[in-house]
Amino acid sequence: MQIQEVNNKKKVAFHTLGCRLNFSESGSIAQGFVDRGYEIVEFGESADVVFLNTCTVTDGADSTCRNLIRKAQNSSPEARIVVAGCYAQMEAEKIKQMQGVDLILGTSEKYKVFDYLESEDELAVHIDKSSEFNIAATTSVDSHTRAFLKIQDGCNYVCSFCIIPFARGRSRAITVAEALKEAKNLASQGFKEIILTGVNIGEYETTSGEKLIDLVRSIVDLPQIQRLRLGSVEPNTITKELLEMLKSSGKYQNHFHIPLQSGSDDILKSMRRKYSISQYKEILAMVESYFPGSAFGADIIIGYPGETEEQFLETFNFLRQSPITHFHVFPYSKRKGTTATKLENHIQSPIKKERVKTLMMLGEAKLDEYSQNQVGTHTEVLFESLVDGYWEGYSSNYLKIRVKSNEDLRNQILPVSIEDYKAGILRGIVL
């Protein structure tokens, strides 16, 4: 297939699904395209190459991936379409049946996309479960203000519902020295906030032999980096030592994403999670003791096989009484190769949908209340973009805040007085 050139510059469009880890990886791959003379255009515009970095954590993610492939075919019928990542790793045969796909690259092979693009094959599939750690981070070509830095990949846990160990392999990690080098590079590009990402970053020390607190300390010591966040952290890996270091850094933001999955001990046990509800409560309390008033996010799976109405209500009541305000609710999906698919009493789809809706409404109400309580307070905001005539950015506790300004506030961290909350939007004034 011949690649058309416009103004002697080839075009590539990206679409990334799923976790922050995927976004960090897309950033590195996008930089590789720019280094080779490509211009990055918006997904949906005509391009010479369309790169889809996919997710397969749920049925919904799989369906979205298939829809994106069709959209890529429609917007760029002459493009070379690359389907990469977790969905490609697990469902290459299904993707092969779709017309227009030129390259199918697994979770490790996607980094070799430039080698494979040179092939003239109509359809090439490269799936490899490599144990290599591929360094990845946001770059300036991403148009992001906050930077994602990948410090860990894969997972050694065997949760009954999770396909990620099959898609990404066993746990592996960056070294502290490599992480510091990448952080310095991000700082040199003007990034002021770094989010450390991975599949299971709490297992960093077990995987790498080095301490996570040493990695974090090396990054917060960089004067250009003013804010730091951790991605999703498994509750059983949060320690006092880690929290003490984060608190003493003065740069860690007061938002924590701590996966829950269920509020029922019986369901957690079947899921093979490494904590009980009482232990999870203790972890939240410990975090709050170091970071009072923090915002908490959590992943929740609803409709796990055998989940009774009583067990669902256990989850609902736990969440209602907890400080968790940022809900990430998923209906349980059968994932190929996982042990949960073999369980009995799978929940019917209408029941799952109704339970998901109920939890989503609770989450919206709790986030609304938490946001309303911010009115009258002061916070610092890292401004990212202009939206509907307002500059918008994230506060320390991961709330979007808008202000009016005639100045360009992009990538500035400024003190803001929060003045009102209407229609789900916090507004304030720069102090």
Image (tube, rainbow, N blue to C red):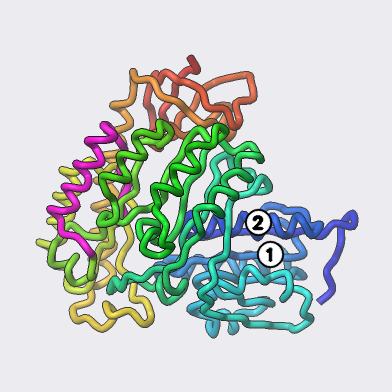
Residue farthest right in this picture: 8
Between residues 193 and 126, which one lies in front from this camera angle?
A: 193
Q: Where is residue 401 in the image (x, y as percent from the top left)?
A: 45, 29
Q: What stretch is highlighted in magenta?
A: 274-299
The numbered disc on residue 66 is none
Residue under the image location 38 percent in, 27 percent down: 422
For marks 2 and 1 on the same chain, the one whose residue lies earlier in the sequence: 2
Count all numbered tags in the image, as a single digit: 2
Residue holding disc 1: 50
Rendered view: 267 above or below 390: below
Q: Which amino acid does label 1 sit on?
A: Val
Q: Position of residue 268 (x, y in %)?
A: 19, 65
Q: Where is residue 149 in the image (x, y as percent from the top left)?
A: 53, 51
Give neighbour class at mark 2: few <14, some 14-19, many 20+ (Cα, 10 Å).
Answer: many
Residue under the image location 26 percent in, 44 percent down: 240
Between residues 152 and 308, which one lies in front from this camera angle?
A: 152
Between residues 252 and 52, which one lies in front from this camera angle?
A: 252
Q: What residue type is labelled 2?
A: Phe
In magenta segment, residue 33: no
Asked whether, in this view, residue 13 is left or right of residue 370, the answer is: right
Q: What element carries label 2?
A: loop
Give neighbour class at mark 1: few <14, some 14-19, many 20+ (Cα, 10 Å).
Answer: many
In magenta segment, residue 287: yes
Residue holding disc 2: 43
Name which quarter of the figure residue 380 lies in. Answer: top left
For marks 2 and 1, give the CA distance.
8 Å
